[in-house]
Amino acid sequence: MKSRILSVIMLLLAVSTLAACHNGQSDDVSLINNPNSALGYDSTASVPHMVFDCNMHDFGRLTPGESLSYSFHFVNKGTADLII
């Protein structure tokens, strides 16, 4: 009985997660401009360029159950909007 209830809860959680992902918005791929293609590279195209202040972080020695976080900071040095 317990496993059946757990299965139903997991199913409801999965369905609600998938339903929330779409969010009623259309997928507009016209915002994305990729100058790299099978035809080559367009060097005159405006492209974003992410530059990080550091690209690695050492957390040192971790203990089991310890919760850690770190934020990587970056700026767009490119000539186009960076869409994340």
Image: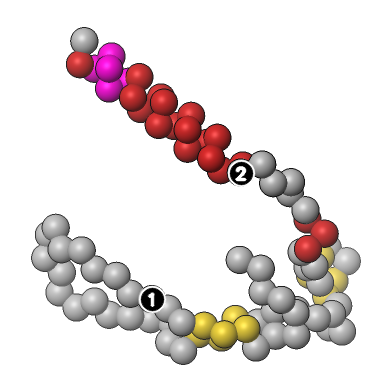
Q: Residue at x 77, y 53 (%)?
A: 28
Residue extent of the magenta highlight: 3-7
- Side of 68 relative to 71 (left or right): left
Q: Residue at x 33, y 24 (%)?
A: 9
Q: Residue at x 48, y 29 (%)?
A: 15
Which quadrant of the structure image shows residue 84? bottom right
Q: CA distance from mark 2 to mark 1?
A: 27 Å
Q: Where is residue 58 shown, x and y percent of the image?
A: 27, 80
Dominant secondary structure, magenta: helix
Which quadrant of the structure image shows residue 79? bottom right
Q: Where is residue 6 shown, x and y percent of the image?
A: 27, 22
**Label 1 amino acid?**
Ser
Q: Where is residue 23 shown, x and y percent of the image?
A: 61, 44
Find numbered disc 2 in the image and state the secondary structure of the residue it sits on.
loop
Residue highlighted by disc 2: 23
The residue furthest left is: 63
Quadrant placement of the N terminus: top left
Residue highlighted by disc 1: 71
Q: Residue at x 43, y 87 (%)?
A: 54
Is 26 located above or below residue 81 in the figure?
Answer: above
